Image (spheres, helix red, strand yellow):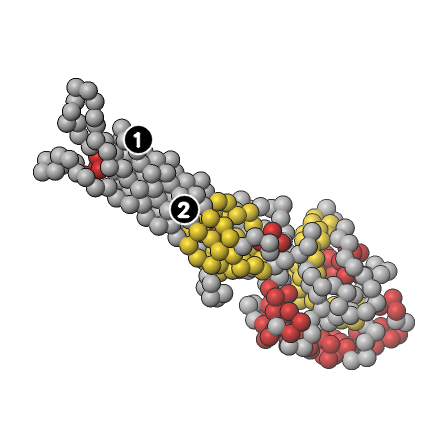
Amino acid sequence: MRFLDQAKIYVKAGSGGAGCVSFRREKYIPRGGPNGGDGGDGGDVLAEVDEGLNTLIDFRYKQHFKAKRGTHGMGSNRSGANGADVVLKLPQGTQIFAEDGETLLADLKEPDQTIVIARGGRGGQGNARFKSSTNQAPRFAQDGEEGEERWIWLRLKLLADAGLVGLPNAGKSTFLAAVSRAKPKIADYPFTTLEPKLGTVVIDDDSFVIADIPGLIEGAHEGAGLGDRFLGHIERSGVLIHLVDGTAEDIEEAYRTIRHELEAYGHGLESRPEILCLNKSDALTKDVADERRARLEAAAGKAVLVTSGASGLGVKDVLRTAWQEIQRARKRRIDLDDDGDEMLP
C-alpha cells in the first residue's frame, strides 16, 4: 500500500429536514388540529481511528464527503428520519487541521477514538409544535438547519516509540531490517528510503515500535527534501537513535548537521533523549573505529556506541538502551496525565 501522510478534503454534514404543515382531516372531524411532524436531524461527519491503517492514501482519490440530510416531517405527527452519518476511517496519529493548515481541530492519538468533524443541522419543527391557546391552527413550520461544512487538512504523524535519524546513506534502513521484520529498500546510495517505515522490535521479551524516516539534509526543518514532513513522524518518539556513518570523512560535521536540524525544527525534538551510534563499523578496522568513536564523543560530549546493522555488532546494546528511555518516557506521560496536564508528544 502506498504511503501518504497528508491530504486536504471537504466535509459537509447533512441539513435538517423541514417540519410539516398538516391538519387532521377525517370524516367526522372536519376541524381537526395541526398534526405536522418534525423533520429529521442531518447526519454528522465523524472521524474514527482504525488501527489497521497506516496511510492516508484513501483520501488521495476521494476528497468530498457528505452526510445525508434529514427526511422532512409528515402529517399524522410523523417525524422524519435522521440522516445517515459519514464515518472517515483514519490511522492512529492523524491530526486534523482547519483550512488554514495551522489551527488544530483534533489529534487522534488514542485507539478507537471518535470525534465529530462536522455536525448535522437540526430538523425543523412541524406546525403541531406551534399550537397555542391563541393560535389553534398554525399554518407554518420550521425549515431544517444547514449542516456544517468545511475544508480540512489531514496530517499523519506516525506513533513510534523510537525514531531513527541520520544523514542519507547512514545505514538506517539496514539497521531497521536487522532489528525488526520490516523490509525497507536497501542500497548503497543516498535516498534509498523515500517514505517513513515502521518496524516492531522484540528485545528481552519486550517490544516497541521504531520508525525509520528518509535521510535528512541541511535545511530539512524548512522543508528541504520534505524534511519537515518527515521530522513530524518522530515528534511522538520517546527516544532518538542517531546513526552516523562511520565511513564518512567528516563524522563531526555529519553529527552537527542533524543536531542543527532537530533544534531548528523544535517541537521538543532537540531535547529528546538521544542514543548516538557510530554505524557501519563492519567496514572499519578496530583501530579506525576506536579513533573515530573518540572523535565523535569529543564533538558530541556524550558516549557513542559502535554499531553495524549489517553484522549486528552493538545492535542489542542500542535496543536495550532505547527500551530504558522508552519506559521513562511512558512513565512521564502517565504522571502528567494523572496530574491533568497536557501529555507529552
Outermost top residue = 28
Instruction: Give how far apart the Cα atoms at labels 2 and 1 are.
Output: 20 Å
- As shown in the figure, which amino acid type bears the numbered disc 2? Gly
Asked which secondary structure carries label 2, the reply is: loop
- As shown in the figure, which amino acid type bears the numbered disc 1? Arg
Work out whether residue 61 or residue 112 is closer to the camera in this orientation and state it.
61
Image quarter (top left, top right, bottom left or bottom right) of the C terminus: bottom right
Residue 80 placement: quadrant: top left
From the top left corner, tell me how far across and down residue 280 is, in percent: 83, 67
Residue 71 placement: quadrant: top left
Confirm whether residue 95 shows in the render: no
Circles 2 and 1, Cβ within 8 Å, touching? The answer is no
From the top left corner, tell me how far across and down residue 207 is, in percent: 69, 49
**Residue to which mark 1 is pinned:** 78
Left or right, 282 with respect to 197, comes to right
**Residue to which mark 2 is pinned:** 14
From the top left corner, tell me how far across and down residue 158 is, in percent: 62, 57
